[in-house]
Amino acid sequence: MELHYTPKHGSWLNVAEIGFSILKRQCIPFRVADINVLRNTVKSFITQRNAEKRVVNWQFTTGDARIKLRHLYPEL
């Protein structure tokens, strides 16, 4: 899991919810009661995805973000 800066008026909670949603849909179909189980499960998922050489088809490009979110990021 990676942590990213969110703008002053952005919501870190939304970012966290999106991250957990991705984990739930892609690699953790069960409730996790232990941080070590979470780490091992995510590590296994990442190893498998990397071995498959999966790619991401980004629909929201950096250029789009700079246009649509410029009010949140006044300076680049």
Image (cartoon, helix red, strand yellow):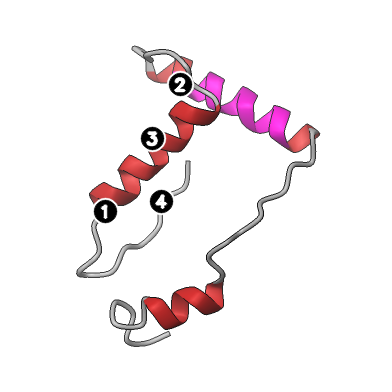
Give the Cα distance between marks 4 and 2: 16 Å
The disc, 4 or 3, on the residue closer to the chain's N-terminal end is 4
Give SS at disc 3: helix
How dense is the environment of label 4, judged by Cα within 10 Å: few (below 14), some, or many (20 and up)? few
Q: Main secondary structure of the magenta part?
A: helix
* Residue 42 is inside the magenta segment: yes
| 13 vs 47, nearest the viewer | 13
- Which amino acid type corresponds to the residue marked 3 in the rendered image? Phe
Q: Earlier in the sequence, mark 4 or mark 2?
A: 4
Q: Which residue is depicted at the point 37% across and 13% down?
A: 31
N-term-proximal mark, 1 vs 2: 1
Query: Of label 1 and label 4, which has the lower sequence position?
Result: 4
Check disc 4 and report the residue beneath it.
3
Q: CA distance from mark 1 to mark 2?
A: 21 Å
The image position of residue 53, as x and y in percent, is 79, 41
Residue 4 vertical position relative to residue 46 in the rendered view, above or below: below
Pick the front one: 50 or 36: 50
Q: Which residues are magenta?
A: 38-49
Write down the residue under mark 1: 12
Q: Secondary structure at mark 4?
A: loop
Write down the quadrant of residue 35 in the picture: top left
- Where's residue 13, x and y in %? 24, 48
Q: Mark 2 = which residue?
A: 38
Q: Position of residue 69 (x, y in %)?
A: 36, 76
Q: Earlier in the sequence, mark 2 or mark 3?
A: 3
Residue 20's mark?
Answer: 3
| Amino acid, disc 1 | Trp
> Residue reaching furthest right?
52
Q: Residue at x 44, y 83 (%)?
A: 67
Image vertical order of residue 15 relative to residue 75, above or below:
above
